[in-house]
Image (cartoon, rainbow, N blue to C red):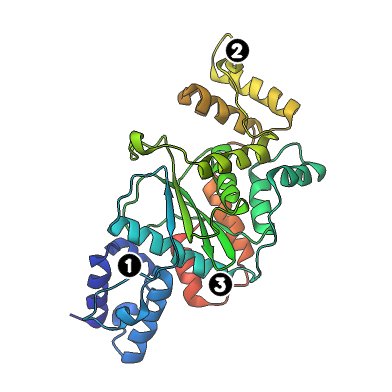
Amino acid sequence: MSKTQVLLHRLQSVGFSEPFLEATLPDWAAQEESPSGQMMLRLLLARRLNLDPEALMDDSTPLGFLQSGPIKFKHMRLAPGQRRDTLTAYALGVTRILLGSASSREAPAIPSAAELRAVTLESGRDNVGFGDVLTACWSLGIPVLHLRLFPAQTKGVTAMAVRIGSRFAILVARESGIPAQYMFHVAHELGHIALGHLKDSAAIIDADPDDPANAGEELIDDEEEREADAYAQQLLTGVEAFAVSRSLAGKSGNAGELAKRAMQLGAELKIDPGHVVMSFGYATREWPMAMAAAKQVPGQEATPASLVNRVLWSQLDNLTDDHALHFLRAVAPV
């Protein structure tokens, strides 16, 4: 068995799947047996996967993850073990590579949600939409990346806010065809960062309380989740507790009427109409109607995950580190 094969077996033993490793390893890894090549490979993997480099160098030593600070899991049934360890190590590793590849600067003080909304509307925007939230994050030195590759099957994860030193990144895990729904997840993570919820933590990993992979009895909002939701709502709507009723769908109660009324209300209140429709879904739980209505709202037909990664790569167009480039293209393709 080659040295690289031994290394791969060790990595699989702590929870990294074979397909994940095949996708993220450098092309030259399988054939590299020289001491210098193996050292480079292991140092690369230690950085990418947040592994203890000394343990990774010695095939007789059990692998261990570096401790970067407490991790907060929200809305998620994920007991201590390999899934949790590999997920958090991966999130920290991706963020380290991402922040090292993006423009190196400490994030400025993040404005309140009301201030950020006011700046956006004063620039001539009709509302705070998906692109505005994305632009705000990048302008504040907070890269946003959509993950398309995971170290193992990870059900229920929506998004993560991650801190490396004094810098932050937002990693989104959930695919959503509705920009407004995706927009709220990003705004929620921005809220965690802005409100100082990561002050003593390395990451907050959020899951969707509506995901059946998560146990209902464990999906209780804590104060930080309520505050992050309020920040997102304030940014997107101007109030911390925006809600709509079943009557928004009108007497006919169909998707077409809901879309029409959402656009009217959105124009009146300077709220993205897609967010109005999603708010209807959350309030009434009539998701089939809400999703059908969203497809009739202009601007909701885009694929948000692809847009996020297109923006990412436009910001990293000067990336010259081939190893970082290979890794990021594997985990965050357009």
Q: Quadrant of residue 5?
A: bottom left
Q: Secondary structure at mark 1?
A: helix
**Image disc number at residue 100:** 3
Viewer-closest of 317 and 126? 126
Q: Are marks 3 and 1 in contact (CB under 8 Å)?
A: no
Query: x, y (%) of residue 209?
Result: 42, 37
Q: Residue at x 27, y 83 (%)?
A: 58
Q: Which residue is mark 2?
A: 250
Neighbourhood count class around disc 1 (C-alpha, 10 Å): few under 14, some 14–19, many 20 upward: some
Q: Secondary structure at mark 3?
A: helix
Image coordinates of residue 165 in percent, x first then y, are 55, 68
Q: Earlier in the sequence, mark 1 or mark 2?
A: 1
Q: Amino acid at mark 3?
A: Gly
Q: Residue furthest top?
A: 251
**SS for tag 2?**
loop
Q: CA distance from mark 1 to mark 2?
A: 52 Å
Q: Nearer the viewer, residue 228 or 244?
A: 228
- Could you give the CA–CA distance between mark 3 and mark 1, rounded to whole angstroms? 23 Å
Q: Residue at x 27, y 64 (%)?
A: 18
Find the distance from the CA under tag 2 to the CA under tag 3: 51 Å
Figure quadrant of residue 304: top right
Instruction: Give the mark nearer the N terminus: 3 vs 1.
Output: 1
The residue that label 1 is drawn on is 22
Q: Please determine whether, in this image, residue 300 is positioned above or below residue 10.
A: above
In this view, the mark in front (2 or 3): 3
Work out whether residue 330 can be spotted: yes
The residue that appears at 47% across and 22% down in the rendered structure is 286
Viewer-closest of 127 and 206: 206
Q: Can residue 302 be seen in the rendering of this structure?
A: no
Q: Which of the image's four quarters has the N terminus?
A: bottom left
- Amino acid under label 2? Gly
